[in-house]
Amino acid sequence: MNEPGKLYVKTFGCQMNVYDTEKIYAFLQDTYVPAASEEEADVIILNTCSIREKAENKVYSQLGRFKPLKDINPDLIIGVGGCVAQQEGERILKRSPSVDVVFGTHNLDELPAMLEERKKSGKRICRVREDTGTVPTADAPRVMGGRGATSLLTIMKGCNNYCAYCVVPFVRGREVSRPASEILDEAVFLVEKGVREITLLGQNVNSYHDPDTGAGFVSLLESMELLPGLERLRFVTSHPKDFSPELAHAMADLPSVCEHIHLPVQAGSDRVLSAMKRGYTSRQYMEKVELLTKLIPEVEFTTDIIVGFPGEEREDFELTMEMLNTVKYQNIYSFRFSSRPGTAAAAMKDPVDADVKRSWLPELQDLQNQITAEKHRNMVGREVEVLVEEKDNKKNGFLEGRTRNNYIVHFPGDPELLGKIVRIRLTNSRAIHVMGEMVN
Ligand code: 5AD
Ligand code: SF4
């Protein structure tokens, strides 16, 4: 038998892509083993993201940097997948001569055949399928999992919401849920491999429906709760408009569901939320935050925010700042609005001067940094439960993990503790994490 080749997949963008990357490794596991670096790879794949223009540009600059690798190794195969591939297709082959294979977000299963064909025929190949409406991983081999204590698990793909700024419904297609039986099967497999924490993944997990039984997301959480050996359960992303009181109660009642929720607010102004077509007001959003805080005292919130949506004025932006001060998010993911082709917002006029808006994002991030710092300081002195996820890659002899409510904790410890749950006393606050030491 031939020596297996070496595969390097570089991931851009969201959690969905992180999961797809795992699937790419899995689809190719019979012929390729993971490479430690781009330099030693026989196949390099870029799993791309088109959610903002900046993410898309990164792909082309990265492709430019692969040219010298191809000069050294003419047999090196370069593939481009993900959302940019889904949208751009053949144009990538035209624009980047070093690319051999382009595959869309619905074509992962064809990748082994495409790579074979490229090797045999020498022809450059592009396959971008229209959304087939099929379930994401029905015919996929199991994701590799077992590479650590935590794993992602896709429960649905696509999105039906068409928020005015967002390209996801166009590239990822309509919403399709996987059967719960298949999800549970995959979860059992992961737990058997040593996974202790699973994050259920979907663009809008709250609208999950088992295609076999019609049962909703809460029912899926209840079934996951019964899996022996699964300590922690998380999920992303929750759309605030579909986040129900029933789900808040389930989070409070199910012991494995962690005390953290990512609830993307996008903006604090009702005028902007309505222009974004988000389907909730700031008051309705706050009602969900208040209910969760009442039911789950330790709960922490994170969110996504877009600054400078078309027509957003200073007073709108200040309402977003107010939102940060009221909710006291643990962390935010904040972005300058980026106009994406084909979306409703791309056609909207913006009377507000771009120069005026430029300073808003750093202003928002400064405020959040102060809030995060204060929250980290408040944790010092407390004793918490941490799932040890990896070695601290900057500090020898240190490990890194997370509390149930999503604080990142660094502490000195033996690598044997990887995958274990330990008790830590928090001693010092830092910008991104909190330092601690083991109790006993
Ligand atoms: N411009 C800026 N940010 C965007 N996001 C999605 N589309 C855009 C866009 N066109 C952000 C949203 C979303 C996150 C994943 O990316 O905040 O929640
Ligand atoms: Fe995009 Fe809105 Fe769907 Fe999220 S809910 S993926 S922001 S369209």
Image (tube, rainbow, N blue to C red):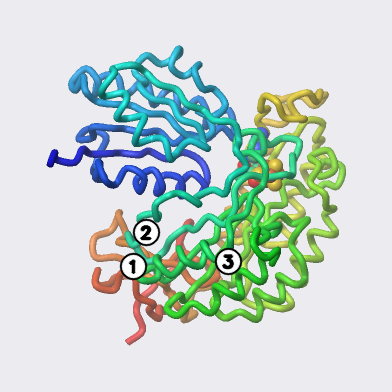
Kind of residue sitting beneath label 3 = Lys
Q: Residue at x 62, y 42 (%)?
A: 133
Earlier in the chain: of badge 3 and badge 1, it is: 1
Q: Residue at x 74, y 57 (%)?
A: 240
Label 2, residues with CA under 10 Å away: few <14, some 14-19, many ≥20:
many
| Of residues 325 and 275, the one drawn nearer to the viewer in this rendering | 275
Query: Quarter-wise, where is residue 329 in the image?
Result: bottom right
Q: Residue at x 32, y 59 (%)?
A: 147
Kind of residue sitting beneath label 2 = Gly
- Tell me, yes or no, whether the two marked residues, 1 and 2, touch with CB atoms within 8 Å: yes
Q: Using residue 60 as the reference point, say whether residue 440 is left or right of it.
A: left
Q: CA distance from mark 3 to mark 1?
A: 35 Å
Q: Is residue 305 visible?
A: no
Which residue, given by chain and number where applicable, does mark 1 sit on? 193
For disc 2, does the CB lie below 8 Å from ligand 1?
no
Mark in front: 3 vs 1: 1
Q: Is residue 85 above or below residue 262?
A: above
Callout 1 secondary element: loop
Earlier in the chain: of badge 1 and badge 2, it is: 2
- Residue 308 in percent (x, y) is at 72, 34
Q: CA distance from mark 2 to mark 3?
A: 33 Å
Q: CA distance from mark 1 to mark 2?
A: 7 Å
Q: Using residue 320 as the reference point, say whether residue 259 is left or right of it.
A: left
| Of residues 365 and 39, the one drawn nearer to the viewer in this rendering | 39
Disc number for residue 169: none
Kind of residue sitting beneath label 1 = Lys
Disc number for residue 145: 2
- Tell me, yes or no, whether the two marked residues, 2 and 3, touch with CB atoms within 8 Å: no
Q: Residue furthest front?
A: 212
Q: Residue at x 42, y 29 (%)?
A: 80
Quadrant hosting ligand 1? top right
